[in-house]
Amino acid sequence: MSSEFDIIRRHFVRPLRQTRQGIGDDCARVAVQPGMELVITSDLLIENTHFLPDADPESLGHKALAVNLSDLAAAGATPLWVTLAAALPRADEDWIAAFARGFFALAERHEVDLIGGDTTRGARCFCVTAMGEVPAGLGLGRGGARPGDDIWVSGELGGAALALEARLGRLRLDPEDLRALGARLDRPEPQVELGGRLRGLASSAIDLSDGLAGDLGHVCERSGVAAEIEWAELPRPAALEAFGDSALSVRCALEGGDDYELLFTTPPSRRDEIRAIASDLSLPLARIGAITPPVTGARVRVRGAHGADIAHAGRGYDHFAAGTA
Ligand code: ADP
Ligand code: MG
């Protein structure tokens, strides 16, 4: 029978790169470099809310960390340290080992140390806190977008939501598309390098976790502006393009979450620099619209191919919204 401490030692203690005191004491201790700011974020993954009981544990380990690294990326921060508080129904060594494999494969790619946490028995739940650094004054946030700024997104939008629709049995996808888009849903790639390159360049940034319309709405709200985007410019996977301008397409591309791409704004004078970053990182960056002066009413306008606006719910997923209880 494994004890709590056996589980921690076997699965969560790894060599550390940039930590003075890691797992094994009451607290972890790290040194923050002079001239840098500490950037901190937490995300919670709960069984039956964020994942199903039969979810692949290795993907879950990846995703628990990825969603946090994505938040640090949106802040322009370099990830350095994470803690993991885990509730597990039983000491299922194979399950925990697979979770740790997914978690550390991503942690190692980004040279992040797991420096502490907590482990208790309970309904499956994972809370990761991620910490990183950014040079003082260069951190990115939702608040700096100005009228006239370009709006950019990385990668493609709506693929994770389309995979989820297929898994819920609401539509059928070609098996190859389902595999590729399912991987985006299960193993999102946080855009850490892009976030770092946007320091001092982007006027605002946010990661797309809850759908473009809602997340861009957060930028508009915090920046005191509005936005106009062009439906035709939204980068969508071919499998989603196939659904044209249908309600499903709109739902996935504008309201669907879990893409974990970055949305950011820059003055038009910086277009060449953005294109250079796209080419350096081999990462598609698409200009999807522009920031406009504040308006009363819907902050995010989506212009359709023929000039008419495309209607959307204008908000992302809300755990406490009416009807989601
Ligand atoms: P305490 O009793 O002081 O809360 P614990 O006995 O819970 O400490 O944990 C022992 C050590 O293991 C601590 O350093 C803690 O940070 C670490 N730890 C516990 N659970 C995890 C986990 N899931 N991942 C990483 N470190 C963990
Ligand atoms: Mg404890």
Image (cartoon, rainbow, N blue to C red):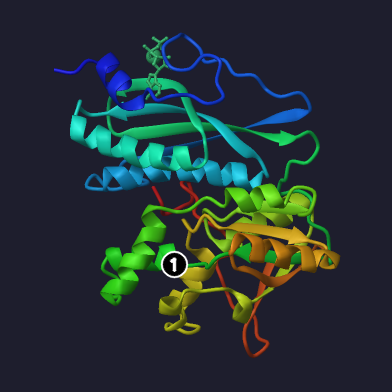
Q: Quadrant of ligand 1?
A: top left
Residue 181 relative to residue 274: left or right? left
Residue 253 relative to residue 264: left or right? left
Q: At 51% across and 70% down in the image, what residue appears?
A: 253
Residue occupying the far top of the picture:
26
Q: What is the number of callouts on the image?
A: 1
Where residue 149 appears, x then y in whole percent? 80, 64
Viewer-proximal residue among 169 and 29: 29
Where residue 252 appears, x then y in whole percent? 46, 69
Where residue 145 appears, x then y in whole percent? 78, 56
Q: Is residue 129 visible?
A: yes
Viewer-proximal residue among 314 and 70: 70
Vertical comparison of 147 with 16: above or below: below
Vertical comparison of 146 with 241: above or below: above
Vertical comparison of 86 with 198: above or below: above
Q: At 19% across and 35% down in the image, what residue appears?
A: 94
Local crowd size for mark 1, using a 10 Å CA cut-off: few (<14), some (14–19), many (≥20): many
Residue 128 relative to residue 254: left or right? left
Residue occupying the far left of the picture:
1
User: Quick one: SS at disc 1?
Assistant: helix
Q: At 79% across and 51% down in the image, what residue appears?
A: 144
Give the residue at mark 1.
Answer: 159
Where residue 185 appears, x then y in whole percent? 39, 57
Q: Within the image, what quadrant is residue 81 found in?
A: top right
Q: Amino acid at mark 1?
A: Gly
Q: At 71% across and 24% down in the image, what residue appears?
A: 33
